[in-house]
Image (spheres, rainbow, N blue to C red):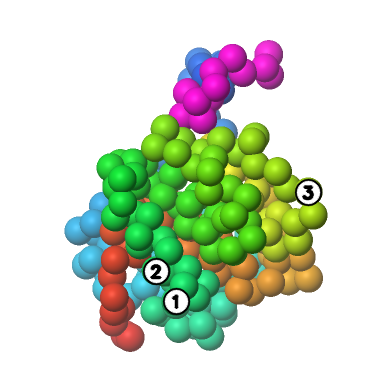
Amino acid sequence: MSKLFCSSPQLCVLERQMQQPPGYRPRGGGIWIMNEAEWRNRGNYLEIVDCVVSRMQMEHLKRRIEEIFCEAGQKLIFSSPAHKEKYLLLMRGKRADIFGSHPNYAAAVFLLSADDGLWERAKRHVTDTGIYFDRIRLGGVTLEQYILFHAAKDVHNGTKHIRLSELADRELVADRLLRLIVNAFVIQKCGVGMTKQEEWNAD
């Protein structure tokens, strides 16, 4: 049965899990969170990225990610200074609790807010009870906005609309876009505190 009866995004995730067979685990699944002490002890952002993507079953994608982060620099988490300012304001506002307690929510908002045009479409559907992806209209969006939207939906809901093979395709997913998506994976696994770190050790 594929129809969901709940309207809240968070309840939809729970309902989807309830529809699965007992003991079901998606391929590559399992909840794994790196706590703050663990990622702070690493100090080097590249090491944290490597730890987060290490479970990917696609070596050439992992090599591409390593190349991107070596070239981009370890401090480059946001798409722009404006993106950083916007995200930190959201994180410290009235939704601070859900940002702190739901890393998947924080990661999804990170991606949705990375593009001004996409955020204009999405922001009214990002609430303190969840993100209502089905209400966000995508007519006329660019390819990058489309990819950001579905990547955000995947990290929020645990779905796989974007396959690893697609992330590995340089013609489909530009380096800048893949870097943002991987940074969202880091937020999802390590928590929103990652974005507050101003400096990362270079070694």
Which span of residues is magenta-colored?
1-14
Amino acid at dot 2:
Glu
Q: Disc 1 and disc 3: Cα gap in Å?
A: 27 Å
Are there few (<14), some (14-19), or many (20+) residues within 10 Å of tag 3?
Answer: few
Which numbered disc covers residue 147? none
* Quadrant housing the C terminus: bottom left
In front of the other: 147 or 20: 147
Which numbered disc covers residue 81? 1
User: In the image, what residue occupies the spot 53% across and 85% down?
Assistant: 71
Any magenta on residue 84? Answer: no
**Who comes first in sequence, dot 1 or dot 3?**
1
Amino acid at dot 3:
Gly
- Label 2 belongs to which residue? 85
Amino acid at dot 1:
Pro
- Label 3 belongs to which residue? 139
Q: In this view, does 55 lie to the left or right of 34?
A: right
In the rendered view, would you say 68 is above or below 149?
below
User: In the image, what residue occupies the spot 67% across and 17% down?
Assistant: 3
In the rendered view, would you say 99 is above or below 200?
above
User: In the image, what residue occupies the spot 53% across and 48% down?
Assistant: 123
User: In the image, what residue occupies the spot 51% across and 82% down?
Assistant: 72
